[in-house]
Amino acid sequence: MKKNTQILITLSLVFTLSLANNVLAKPKQLIKIAYITQEQAVPAALSNLDVFIQNKGMVGAELAIEDNNTTGQFTAQHYQLVKVVVPLSCHTQQWFIEDIAEDINFVVVNLPSPKLKIIADLPQAQNKLLFDVATRDDDLRGEQCRDNVLHLQPSRAMRADALAQFMLKKRWKKWFLVTGMDKNDRLFSKAIKRSAKKFGLNIMAKKSWEHTYDARRTAQSDVPVFTQEVDDYDVLVVADEKGLFGEYLDYRTWKPRPVMGTQGLVATSWHETHEQWGAVQMQNRFKEVAGRLMEEEDYAAYLAVRAIGEASVRTKSNQLFPIKDYLLGDQFALQGYKGKPLSFRAWNGQLRQPILLAAPRSLVTVAPIEGFLHKTTELDTLGFDLPESTCGRK
């Protein structure tokens, strides 16, 4: 009996080793992913606290490749990241044409809106799927949308809607809107006005910041005078995406009011204070590798590469159309450390995701806020829903 048992154990081990050898011998399916970005000129520091980060996004993509390849050990797939960093003085479209090979179907694009549009319209990009990890522009999800682009960052409309939901819950229905002079400030201001109308909130006053950006003068003199003449409002909403003056509004307005928008309480896809749903492990992993905190671009690039990995595993394919169809289909679900599965809106390529509402040193809440309902998913209460969409995606 003992001898028979030993024979069975030996046969079992031989069978297991045979299976393992077959898996190892099987050629792995290769999925190539390109990552393109451009060097940036170091801007003038607005504060000694501001640290310029040259490689935002890159580390997130590298971590996701590592995670994809962990899964790939069991699915006979291998993921390769091809990194293209365009020098500051060069044209990104030329580098895209020359450095991103025809056999690369998926490209993570960390570039501003004008350069993203140029690349998306290239003949060489028509048979690729681009993952936009940098822009917030609503027009890229609307009338300027491209069929070959998916967006990983929340749009300005999504961010504004998240803030509006929270304000409505707090019954802070009267807003004082302050807008900077930059083009992107005006775009965020436009999104705020849309959200106010959407949720039935009132903009009691609108003013443009046209004062100095000198910190000492702004903080001690300009802000109190600038806000003094506005009497009746619950919250000051600021649109200052470059952070030129918005940081100096807190505690310096003529009336004691909270500040929200691009400063104060902000709507963001990722934040250093986020620790729920396994986020603390991701925060620690990232910091160990990068030596810094994870930024929104890092998180977006991580999600882009992980989305490709998830779709390729489910479809058992490395080809463009099976993966694209799966990404835009009802079955796709991506875990993003925010408590709900993430998915893409088929009508404009925008990633659905919860929005974090965070103060500088604390996570306040997560939108969509409880009580805001939708017939399909509460995540579609943020940003442009299908009936509102002006995107003509095929």
Image: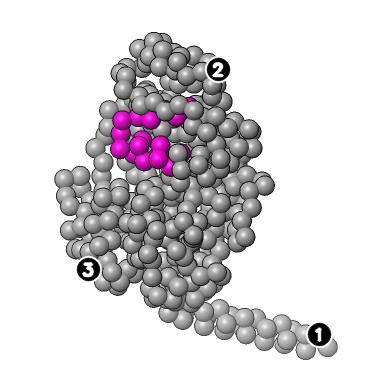
Q: Of label 2 and label 3, which has the lower sequence position?
A: 3
Q: Is residue 211 left or right of residue 88?
A: right
Would residue 40 appear left or right of 229 to someone viewing this image? left
Q: Which residues are magenta?
A: 176-192
Query: What's the amino acid at mark 1?
Result: Lys
Mark 2 or mark 3, which is nearer to you?
A: 2
The answer to the question of whether label 3 and label 1 lie on touching residues, with beta carbons closer than 8 A, is no
Does residue 318 sit above or below 165 in this rendering? below
Query: Secondary structure under badge 1?
Result: helix
Quarter of the C terminus within the rendering: bottom left
Q: Around disc 3, counting alpha carbons within 10 Å, would you say few (fewer than 14), some (14 to 19), or many (20 or more)?
A: few
Q: Which residue is at 51% across, 70% downward?
A: 329
Q: Which mark is residue 256?
A: 2
Residue 281 in view (yes/no): no
Q: Which mark is residue 2?
A: 1
- The kind of residue tagged 3 is Pro
Classify mark 2: helix, strand or loop.
Answer: loop
Q: Which residue is mark 3?
A: 123
Name the spot of residue 146 as percent of width and height, x first. Answer: 33, 62
Q: Is residue 4 left or right of residue 202?
A: right
